[in-house]
Amino acid sequence: MNAAARATTAEAPHAGASLAVALDDIAISFAVKGRPVFNAVAPTSLHMREGEFVAIVGPTGCGKSTLLNATAGLLAPAGGTVSIFGEKLIGLNARAGYLFQQDALMPWKTALDNVAIALEIGGMARAQAHAQAQDWLKRVGLARFTERYPHELSGGQRKRVALAQMLIRQPKILLMDEPFGPLDAQTRQIMGTLLLRLWAQDRKAVMFVTHDLEEAIALSDRVVIMSAGPEARIIGDYPIDLARPRDAAEIRLDPRFHELHRTIWNQLKTEVAKTYGDDMDGVEVSS
Amino acid sequence: MKLHPAKLLFLQILVAVAALAVWQVGATVPIGGDYLLPEFFFSKPGDVLSRVVELFVSGTIWKHLWITLTETVLAFLIGAIGGVVIGFWFARKPVVAAVFDPYVKMVNALPRVVLAPIFMLWLGLGIWSKVALGVTLVFFIVFFNVYQGVKEVSPVVLANARMMGMNERQLFRNVYWPSAMSWMFSSLHTAVGFALVGAVVGEYLGSSAGLGYLIHQAEGVFDVTGVFAGMFILAAFVLVIDWFVTRVEKRLLVWRPQAASEQN
């Protein structure tokens, strides 16, 4: 298992200056009063090239999102460094866009205003920002819903607005934290295909956290496996050599998809079993 | 099950007619030589109505209505502005909030009516002592709502806005302010209602004009018809203000799901 992680690190120098994200020996811990410090993520490293779509998969509570938040600058790591395009990250990551799992739209703004504000705060004139927002909402298939408030939209539609809100700023790095988690299976696949189509236009670096291995393989160039927490770390790194452009739903019928799924699942399932095994132990101890 | 609007209106009117009929019969038809609702204590619907008409026709009521309205609006505005400013300040500066916490609770726990004589002493018998009483009521409602509104901004919405690149000023304008306003407007009915209560109670306790004064005057001379006429006008006045507030609220909170605004 360690071999895989080391292989990633060893591979990194190849990429050289075109690394979009470099997490080096990142450790993340949480201090809760009256309890020993909780080491969520043990020192681990992850490098992402420019334009690379990396999916991070792992059992629940393994610290996938923590890794993402460290890259976003929302969370300061306890150790190690986060470098964005070769520069050490201090404060919030201004070059990254973040797509949250939960609803993050401002409920008091219409879909159009929610998307346009992303440009307006950068100083763009209102009319121009609105024109661009209109265009982006069309691209995510919401041309007819621009004047709706978030509560008047379905979960999938809200996600589309959030996607437009993130992409309109043209961030160099996209961070996504189980973005399609709350959606139903069909909507997830439709959203996946939409994401791939938009991404293909100007391939940004994507860090996509999910617990759904199928989704990870269908979308990404590389699947990274994290071990069960605490002290989670990266224990596997698999290139996904499926041809692009892909359809997030149809690719699942591809024989190569099944092969990759089998290989990765073999490793992932032991980690998933560990989390549940721990839970079971916990139940026994407390009862 | 939803009633047809016309049918609903009919039933609502029916309730009023029935109540008035009971009142009329109780006041005019003796049952076993006794009146159920003696005229001296309860007056008669017809008398009250003609008194209301008389008040409006002679024009005396307008002055009183105007005074009460002025006091209500002033109390609401001053109380609301104060509540918003202090609410924001406390919510953004937890240390300040912690220091003042016991005092805020203490003052809020005080029944406001006991402050009326003090305000009268300080501010005289004019409108300002009534405004002050209304302010002490409105302030706390708005203050607590704004405080809550700023505190309970969704952390995800906030993180998203930060990632978008908003600075503190933009966060205030686009996130904190709308959130606080939504909480404030959801308590608009209560706040306006309390502003009116402050004004009327203040007038009742000592003044020379206003609806509360009118009712108090009538009471002083056992003019029950006058008291009921004053109460009737006051109730109608509240309904008009409430209708107006509902209109304002509908306009300002269009972005809210229906269920949430109906709860208030």
Image: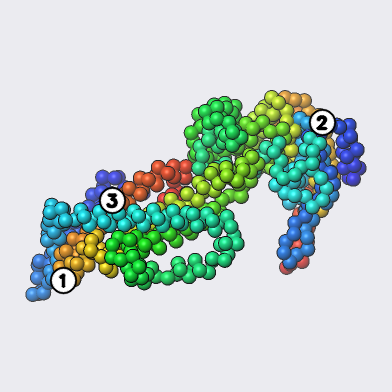
Give the camera-side residue of B244 and A240: B244
Tell me where residue B185 appears, x and y as whole percent: 43, 50
Between the C-alphas of marks 2 and 1, the distance is: 92 Å
Q: Is residue B84 left or right of residue B67?
A: right
* Residue pictured at 87% horizontal, 38% vertical: A8
Assign a secondary structure to mark 2. Answer: helix
The residue identified by callout 2 is A18
Identified by mark 2, the residue type is Ser
Assign a secondary structure to mark 3. Answer: helix
Mark 1 and 3 residues: CB-CB less than 8 Å, in contact? no
Q: Quadrant of residue B44?
A: bottom left
The residue identified by callout 3 is B240
Q: Is the residue marked by circle 1 packed among few (<14), some (14-19), or many (20+) residues within 10 Å?
A: few
Q: Earlier in the sequence, mark 1 or mark 3?
A: 1
Q: Quadrant of residue B160?
A: top right
Task: From this view, report whether residue B123 is shown above or below residue A263.
Answer: below
Q: Chain of mark 2?
A: A
Give the camera-side residue of B212 and B45: B212
Q: Is residue B139 visible?
A: yes
Between the C-alphas of marks 1 and 3, the distance is: 29 Å
Tell me where residue B125 appears, x and y as whole percent: 28, 65
The residue identified by callout 1 is B222
Give the camera-side residue of B123 and B82: B123
